[in-house]
Amino acid sequence: MLQVRQRFERIVALRLRERAIEGYVPLRRIGRKANGTSIELPLFRGYAFCKYDEVAVSSFYDIPGVLCMVQGTDGINIIPEQQITDLRRILASGLDVQAWPFTLQGGTVMAEDGPLSGVTGILKQRTDKRFLVLSIQLIRWSIAVKIDRLSRTSFRPGAETINL
């Protein structure tokens, strides 16, 4: 995970791919009601996901916009692959994604069916609405997907999340 200058997320991901390093910037579509157009913006402003080996680390800092590698307080800089997969599935589902206060508390569940089938997260309830929350501990950000009451999505207790 790299911390990058805001608005440089896509440029950094492109430069990583040019160096044969897998880069990923999750994007969300923002619709404009006035003229019906939409734009895509980074879901996590100021961050770019990447898979790398130790040899590649030294080449990060000559990419325009890269500020630093993100490390947790324990020195670990890994995001579990399952979280990246879940993030990709959530974005591919076409459901509305929103920012959520960072949380690791709550019961972990896995969606059994519907567009989020196989996604693991924390099920939260607010008034009469249900949300599936995905938290990225390394950057302390969470996102949520509203689960429509009329949808037939069912959940089962999920495996415990790995806190790295």
Image (cartoon, helix red, strand yellow):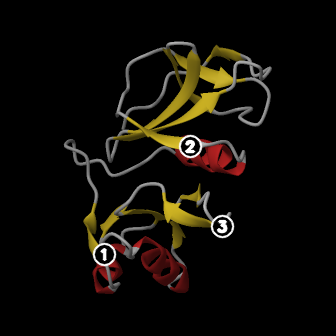
Question: Residue at point 50% right, 13% down?
Answer: 127
Q: Residues within 10 Å of mark 1 (few under 14, many from 20)?
A: many
Amino acid at pointer 3 = Thr
Compared with 19, 93 (above or below) is: above
Q: Is residue 130 left or right of residue 150?
A: left
Element at label 2: strand
If you read the primary sequence from the N terminus, does the residue marked by circle 1 or circle 2 appear first? 1
Question: Residue at point 61% right, 42% down?
Answer: 86
Residue designated by label 3: 37
Residue designated by label 1: 66
Report, in whole angstroms, how far the alpha carbon at label 1 lies from the one at label 2.
Answer: 26 Å
Amino acid at pointer 1 = Val
Residue designated by label 2: 97
Q: Position of residue 121 (x, y in %)?
A: 54, 28
Q: Is residue 45 left or right of residue 81?
A: left
Element at label 3: loop
Report, in whole angstroms, how far the alpha carbon at label 3 lies from the one at label 2.
Answer: 18 Å
Amino acid at pointer 2 = Val
Residue 1 bears which disc, if any? none
Report, in whole angstroms, how far the alpha carbon at label 3 lies from the one at label 1.
Answer: 30 Å
Please state which of the two labelled residues, at mark 1 or mark 2, is closer to the viewer.
2
Q: Quadrant of the N terminus?
A: bottom left
If you read the primary sequence from the N terminus, does the residue marked by circle 3 or circle 1 appear first? 3
Q: Position of residue 110 (x, y in %)?
A: 64, 24
Please state which of the two labelled residues, at mark 3 or mark 1, is closer to the viewer.
3
Residue reaching furthest front? Answer: 34
